[in-house]
Image (cartoon, coloured by chain):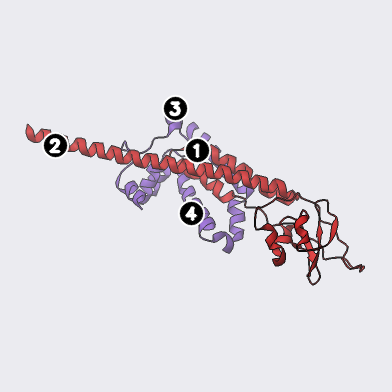
Amino acid sequence: MNRYFYIDAEGNQKGTFTALELKQESVKRDTLVWTQGMEQWKRAEEVDELRYLFSGTYQEAPSYPAQPVQSPGGQASYAPGIDEKEQRPMPKTWLVESILVTILPFMLCGSFLSLLGIIGIVYAAQVESFYNRGDYVAAAESSRSAGKWTRIAMWIAIGWVLLFVIGMILIFGIIGWAGFSEMGNMIEM
Amino acid sequence: MAALFVFYTLDPAEQPLFPRCPFLLATGYECPGCGSQRAIHSLLHLEFKSAFRHNGMVLLAIPYVLLGVYLQYFGGSKRNPRLEKKFFGRWSALAVLLGILIFWIGRNLI
């Protein structure tokens, strides 16, 4: 069975553990792990043998700085450097959606809805800033908020449109009915 | 499709059925979107001049929105990541908001 090293939240290398033993350790999806035969440190979720650890819930790991890590096995060489940007994909920014949900209501006379979209844009813009700064937790947090506000704006906009569609149908119906009865009156006269 | 048909056959300037801008009703000032339904009606009749008169920003907003929809929902951001960065990045978001703000103030002053 493979024995794994991993890097804990403080950036310390721990090991070795078997895949089963890792269950007792605080290994998260994006915890970096290494075992014999791997070229690079990998996120735990990318290792087939460890995937069972995350079949349940998703847990956010606190961010830690990249550091060179002593290669296991007592050799003098260093493990491959950890490129954080490659290791952690940027969370969804929601920029396109939030911009769309800000512009579209103007065309539907729902300008007040755009305020919600603007909140979405502000959060969406933060995602990339935090990510570039290396603050992955804050980036994920902003991404969540951006998504939340964008979706709120979207659903209210959909409701708004539905309201008008229903309103239009009703008015059409009334006009049609009124026109019809007027004609009836004229015929009577 | 149905919406396009409605906007083509009925003139929002004459029909009372189309939604009215709550901001215009409340304040008497036009919001950045006022006139866009009339503009769409004009556009569908290929009357670009009157579309521009009703709401010039719609002429810019429609291609922009279509671009966004393409990027987001038709795989555009995978095929053209640079396009997304350019038109839907952080600075473009700011530019869009500023543009709307300027248009908003400008149209009520002139």
Residue at the left extreme of this rendering? A189
The first of marks 2 and 1 along the sequence is 1
Tell me where residue B26 sits by quadrant: top left
Which residue corresponds to mark 2? A183
Separation of disc 3 and disc 2 at Cα? 37 Å
Cβ–Cβ under 8 Å for marks 1 and 3? no
Crowd band around label 3 with a 10 angstrom C-alpha radius: few (<14), some (14–19), many (20+): few
- Image position of A87 (left or right of A5): left
- Tell me the kind of residue under disc 4: Leu
Which residue corresponds to mark 4? B66
Shown in red, the chain is A
The subunit carrying tag 4 is B
Shown in purple, the chain is B
Separation of disc 2 and disc 1 at Cα? 42 Å
Crowd band around label 2 with a 10 angstrom C-alpha radius: few (<14), some (14–19), many (20+): few
Q: Which mark is residue A113?
A: 1
Same chain for labels 4 and 2? Say yes or no. no
Same chain for labels 2 and 1? Say yes or no. yes
Which residue corresponds to mark 3? B26
The mark closer to the camera, 1 or 3, is 1
Cβ–Cβ under 8 Å for marks 2 and 1? no
Crowd band around label 4 with a 10 angstrom C-alpha radius: few (<14), some (14–19), many (20+): few
- Tell me the kind of residue under disc 3: Ala
